[in-house]
Image: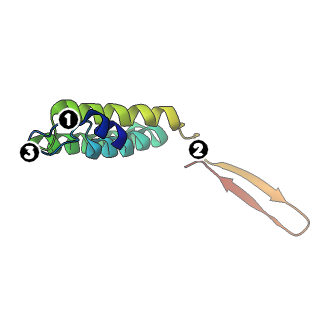
Amino acid sequence: MHTLKYAIDEKRPDSEARNSFPSGHTAAAFSGASFIQRRYGWTLGAPAYALATFVGYSRVHAGAHYVHDTLAGAAIAVGFTYLFTEPRADGLRIAPVVGERRTGLRISGRF
C-alpha cells in the first residue's frame, strides 16, 4: 500500500501534504472487516463493514482524503483478503483419542 502511495504521490485535499491515494486508514479498516466476513460470515461481517465504512467516511469528512482515495483503499484491501483468506470450515471437529496411556477427545477447528 505504501509503495502505491509514494508511486502515485497525490496531494491531500486539506494541505500540501502528499501520498493521499489510496487511503491507508480505510484499507486497514476494510482489511479487518473483510477478513471477519470471510472467516466468520455476514453476521459478524456486516457490523465490521459498517464500522469500516465509517472510517472511510470520516477520512473524507476530515478532509484527509478524496472519495476515490477511500474507495481504492477499500477495494484493494477486500481484493487481497479474498485472494489470501479462505473461508472458515464449518463447525468444530471432535474425535476420540485412545492410546496406551491416554484416552480423551481431540477438538479442533479453524480460526
Asked if residue 48 lies left or right of residue 19, the reply is: right
x, y (%) of residue 92? 62, 48
Q: Earlier in the sequence, mark 3 or mark 2?
A: 3
Q: Which residue is mark 2?
A: 91
Q: Quadrant of the N terminus?
A: top left
Q: Are marks 1 and 3 in contact (CB under 8 Å)?
A: no
Task: Name the amino acid type tagged 3.
Answer: Ser
Secondary structure at badge 1 equals loop
Question: Badge 3: how crowded within 10 Å, few (<14), some, or many (20+)?
Answer: few
x, y (%) of residue 97? 80, 58
- What residue is rendered at 34% in x and 43% in y? 2
Answer whether residue 60 is visible to the viewer in this image: yes
Task: Name the amino acid type tagged 2.
Answer: Gly
Q: Earlier in the sequence, mark 1 or mark 3?
A: 1
Residue 86, by quadrant, is top right
x, y (%) of residue 7? 31, 35
**Disc 1/disc 2 C-alpha distance (Å):** 46 Å
Residue 46, by quadrant, is top left
Vertical relation: 107 (above or below) 24: below
The image's mark for residue 15 is 3
**Disc 1/disc 3 C-alpha distance (Å):** 11 Å
Which of labels 3 and 2 is toward the front? 3
- What residue is rendered at 59% in x and 47% in y? 110
The image's mark for residue 10 is 1
Q: Earlier in the sequence, mark 1 or mark 2?
A: 1
Asked if residue 102 lies left or right of residue 88, the reply is: right
Secondary structure at badge 2 equals loop
The image's mark for residue 64 is none
